[in-house]
Amino acid sequence: MKDSRKEIISWSLYDWANSAFATTVMAAFFPIFFSQYWSYGADSAESTFFLGMGNSLASLLVAVMSPIIGAIADKGSYRKKLLILFAFLGAASTAGLFLVSMGMWPLAIILYVIANIGFASANTFYDSLLPTIASEKKVDFVSSLGYSLGYIGGGLLFLLNVLMFLMPQTFGLADEIMAVRLSFLMVGAWWIVFSVPLLLFVKEPEGQRMKLSTAMKEGFGDLKNTLKSLRKLKNTAFFLVAYWCYIDGVDTIIRMATDYGTALGFSASSLIVALLITQFVAFPAALIYNMFGKKIGVKRALLVAIAAYMIIACLGFFMTKESQFYALAVCIGLFQGGIQALSRSYFSRLIPEEESAQFYGFFNLLGKFAAIIGPLLLGIVTLITGQQKYGILSLIILFLAGFILLRKVDDSHIKDDIEKFREAKR
């Protein structure tokens, strides 16, 4: 039965669980700790090269795997099992970073790559459970609730970890190094503990039960059929391309904001404060934006958010002071959760529910390929002009492309399109 309060809360808590990895590890401590501790005394060019290669390899593996393992999960009703498997893989690898000593940067990279694969792959199955636990009436709220809890959960643990780093003696720790190492252990434990409600209370969607080997065989065949029949879902395909464009711009701003702030001469503490501001503003904003989407329509709300990001890129162009950087962090927080949550829930309306894991595999494939064009565009424009502010301004191209393509999506006949898609696959 859909819209069970226990299932909705249990599902949403997984966002609370895994967002700690995105904030404490990916956004903050791993990049800093890698360069200043694990690769200390090593050839910095060599270690940085292998870190970049590791990140690229992880992204490529996840992008290629997502639709395939999604199809397998749909065929054999393995969504929940695979989610827990990859979540545990990610959490255990993150916790394992606690044991990595100074100078052991190859091991740090290996564990970080495995953690990234676990994080991204688990998200495919997590997202695919959304249309099975929430009705169309509640799907936007449930998606927003997940992102909202993710921002506050990840933000709270990150705040604690930052305080441990700034005041290690207050927490009975020897130094900043031990604070960071302990933070990795805490993220792994946090991830596992708050995944338990999903494991216990969210039901595996009903479907045909089969052996994993049979599910793999049929999953590959079904994926091939889906790709052949995808032309019947033109609006779904349009949305995926639009999503790729605008989420590429969003991810580029998220990933490059710290680098941009550093280039402007802002202190490391101000960058951390800005990240915390974004987290805690995004917590209520994701839920409020859901109400806004309910009032004007989800598609229109997404168009408003894309337009807002165009304005954010313009504001970034003129930014010169730390106070302006904080104001920009507030602006990003106001729309970041909304655009992510409503994109996820809007996509659930454009796909056949029985194949949600496979389709969310495509969704997350584009999510992994996002922030490829954006950083490249930003880098080229910066190189040509010699100023990063022109690179930030160039991201408007991605948002504009996403805005135009999203406007072309006609969701009024999507149910008929899905039926035609099902008929084409029979």
Image (cartoon, rainbow, N blue to C red):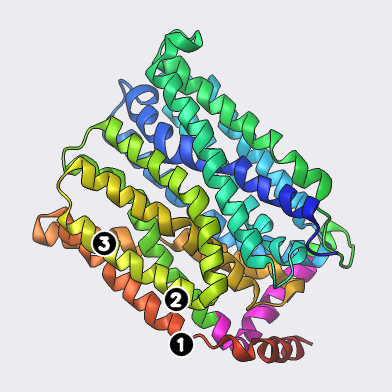
Label 1: how many residues lie within 10 Å, few (<14), some (14-19) or many (20+)? few
**The magenta segment:** 217-236
**Quick check: 238 left or right of 386?**
right
Q: Quadrant of the C terminus?
A: bottom right
Residue 211 or 266: which is nearer the viewer? Answer: 266
The residue that label 3 is drawn on is: 313
Q: Amino acid at mark 1?
A: Lys
Q: Is residue 272 above or below residue 233?
A: above
Q: Amino acid at mark 3?
A: Ala
Label 3: how many residues lie within 10 Å, few (<14), some (14-19) or many (20+)? many
Magenta-colored segment: predominant secondary structure:
helix
Give me the C-alpha separation between circle 3 and circle 1: 24 Å
Measuring 61% from the left and 47% from the top, which residue is drawn there? Answer: 15
Mark 1 and mark 2 in contact? Answer it, CB < 8 Å.
Answer: yes
- Place residue 347 in its image quadrant: bottom right
Give me the C-alpha separation between circle 1 and circle 2: 9 Å
- Place residue 129 in its image quadrant: bottom right
Q: Is residue 246 magenta?
A: no
Is residue 58 in sight in this rendering? Answer: no
Q: Is residue 133 above or below residue 121?
A: below
**Quick check: 131 left or right of 315?**
right
The residue that label 1 is drawn on is: 408
Q: Earlier in the sequence, mark 3 or mark 1?
A: 3
Q: Earlier in the sequence, mark 1 or mark 2?
A: 2
Mark 2 and mark 3 in contact? Answer it, CB < 8 Å.
Answer: no
Give me the C-alpha separation between circle 2 and circle 3: 18 Å
Depth-wise, is mark 2 or mark 3 nearer the camera? 3
**Quick check: 275 left or right of 261?**
right
How far from the left and from the top, in percent, is residue 317? 18, 58
The residue that label 2 is drawn on is: 242
